[in-house]
Amino acid sequence: MAPKNRKADSVSSAEQQRMQMADVARLAGVSTSTVSRALSGSPLVNDETRHRISELARSLGYTVNISAQNLRLKQNRTVAVVVPYDGKTRQHLSDPFFLSMLGSIADSLTDRGFDMLLSRVDSEQLYSASQAFDTGRAIGIILIGQWRHHDQLNQMAARKVPIVVWGAQLPQQLYVTIGSDNVSGGFMATDHLVNIGRKDIAFFGDIQLPEVAQRYEGYCRALSKHGIRVNPQLVVPASFLETGGSQAVSELQHRQVRFDALFACSDLLATTAINFLREQKISVPQDVAVVGFDDIELARYFHPPLTTIRQPIQIAGQALVEALLAVIEGKRSTPGLLTAELIVRSTA
Amino acid sequence: MAPKNRKADSVSSAEQQRMQMADVARLAGVSTSTVSRALSGSPLVNDETRHRISELARSLGYTVNISAQNLRLKQNRTVAVVVPYDGKTRQHLSDPFFLSMLGSIADSLTDRGFDMLLSRVDSEQLYSASQAFDTGRAIGIILIGQWRHHDQLNQMAARKVPIVVWGAQLPQQLYVTIGSDNVSGGFMATDHLVNIGRKDIAFFGDIQLPEVAQRYEGYCRALSKHGIRVNPQLVVPASFLETGGSQAVSELQHRQVRFDALFACSDLLATTAINFLREQKISVPQDVAVVGFDDIELARYFHPPLTTIRQPIQIAGQALVEALLAVIEGKRSTPGLLTAELIVRSTA
DNA sequence: CTGAAAGCGCTAACAC
DNA sequence: GTGTTAGCGCTTTCAG
């Protein structure tokens, strides 16, 4: 979004005069109305004239100024996609899962003839995600990740900002979310670990985040199904940063708690944890079985290939776009819960 | 970009009237001029009035319509980032290298207070990459990948479209490119393979693409330095698709040519090739040493960890943005050649 | 200090 | 069929 100091260093059109409709009109010896009509293929204009004008425009390299057109027509085909960043670390946009999601959304939007405006906001200021809409640049917002700011999102929805969020479905929710079935995902992961004979299953993830909380719920349910008590010592609030996995394992070791498996809430977490374990000659999956979450591309190629819960990213992108368009058209679209899937590879 | 049939299914602002400056003005009992001035912090307006108006605007949730403002001010802080897709396969935007690059550019743009408009074009119609600029939506274009359409890009540059391309520097080039030093990268990869005792080094990559051609040049130079003849049988025009690696290896095997190493022009190619080799019990690096290109995140976590040539993506994003801004300001910026780096891991 | 009026580039009644 | 005119939401001379 435009910064506070726009005025100061704004890029003004230092460019040499760019062609306008009036120029084309003059050159064609007609009025701008005629040019406008010709270019928009109006049946009101003579075929011959239309051809002449389109040709002229083409040869001049003239294109209608979309912004002016949009202003006049009060229309817009731009959707803003907002990716929050962690305000404290202000880390780069590099998480493969988010990037894939972006790619998927970009494709869906392109297919439907929408432009995509990408912006980033501090995860603590999610409310500013609506800026692109408030300023009239976009007709709606797709927010990737709800963090812990359910309230801010609800406020935006109450303000009638057309927004769809990738995340967990929460009680009292005024905005539409699309997300994987995290509870089921967490359940499948944990259930699988128990089924292969593991009992002391660690959980890596920040339960403050709604999606993680739901995965945790699935984790608890699976344990309880098998009559295993949840051991709080085994639950580590790992972050999604690069160092998350090793830190979490260290923490676990520091707590001196025994574990023969771990369920990590992202593949990145899982892979960094595995690498850290291997550095200590702890073998995966023999000593510690691991299940990740996301099924990013890396998971398939990792060694050993990562057992994980797949989130259907391609479907997610389409669902997000569809849901947003529905919201914009005033349809009360239901929150989407996409099926997560257990992908068994070699780490569990 | 907007599709041909915009009119038909265009999303018109069905939204309930959104607040305008006139509304704020009426509510504040002043003219729109005053509101405009107050909101833009003009010293011309009374402090008290300014405060009153800003407060009112805030409480009403009013924000200036940026599009209208831009039209009036003839300014714009949007940069279009264009990612070509292969027209034949129309594959999804999923290549990790491109995605990382996108992330990096998004970050640079955000840091400088620019918005990013993401679009995709058919790689055979690269000229349409300028659309966002032609229609006045963006002040410039960053194109990721030049494919084989040097000519189209030159034409755009001749038309004074502010564009910067991620790719290879070519002779007679009118547009600015930023790219890794591909020749040096190709050289380092091949040189390394020879240095560890390999002689029959296959090359995987489509030489039609300028960047690949330069890597090939480096490959040839390294071989020649060591007095090894280039064997055309070892050169396979692999595509960057998912199946590229296995297809290329098959092709090589079909040609019945001996090879004890391979230099793949992307990590994706390298990893899929390695997996295919392993399926046939050909061990890497013992039987075949492999060097990739890009150093995507996957490379580090792959098994065995991939030896590769790193392209400095974070720097690339910054360089692209800087170069584009320079072009826009009319500065004749020199093409950027970023240092590639050999990262030795386990596959060679 | 504030308001009236013109105009950014375009489209759509409404005239002719 | 085509031109004239008004106006999308905003900023900025120019008067007062």
Image (cartoon, coloured by chain):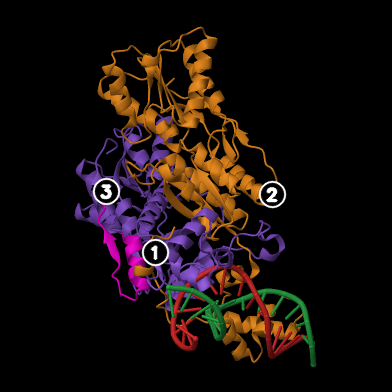
Chain colours: A purple, B orange, C red, D green
The residue mark sitting in front, 3 or 1, is 1
Stretch in magenta: A319-341
Q: Quadrant of residue B34?
A: bottom right
Query: According to the image, label 3 marks what residue?
Result: A189
Task: Point out residue A293 in the picture as x, y percentages from the top left corner.
Answer: 33, 48
User: Mark 3 touching mark 2, by CB under 8 A?
Assistant: no
Three-letter amino acid code of the residue under disc 2: Gly
Task: Point out residue A341 in the picture as x, y percentages from the top left corner.
Answer: 24, 49
Whichever of labels 3 and 1 marks the residue nearer the N terminus, that label is 1
Closer-to-camera residue (A137/A205): A137
Q: Which mark is residue A165?
A: 1
Q: Quadrant of the C terminus of chain A?
A: top left
Left or right of C9? Residue A152 is left
Q: Quadrant of residue B304?
A: top left
Whole-Å distance between the Cαs marked 3 and 1? 24 Å
Task: Point out residue A309 in the picture as x, y percentages from the top left corner.
Answer: 29, 48
Three-letter amino acid code of the residue under disc 1: Val
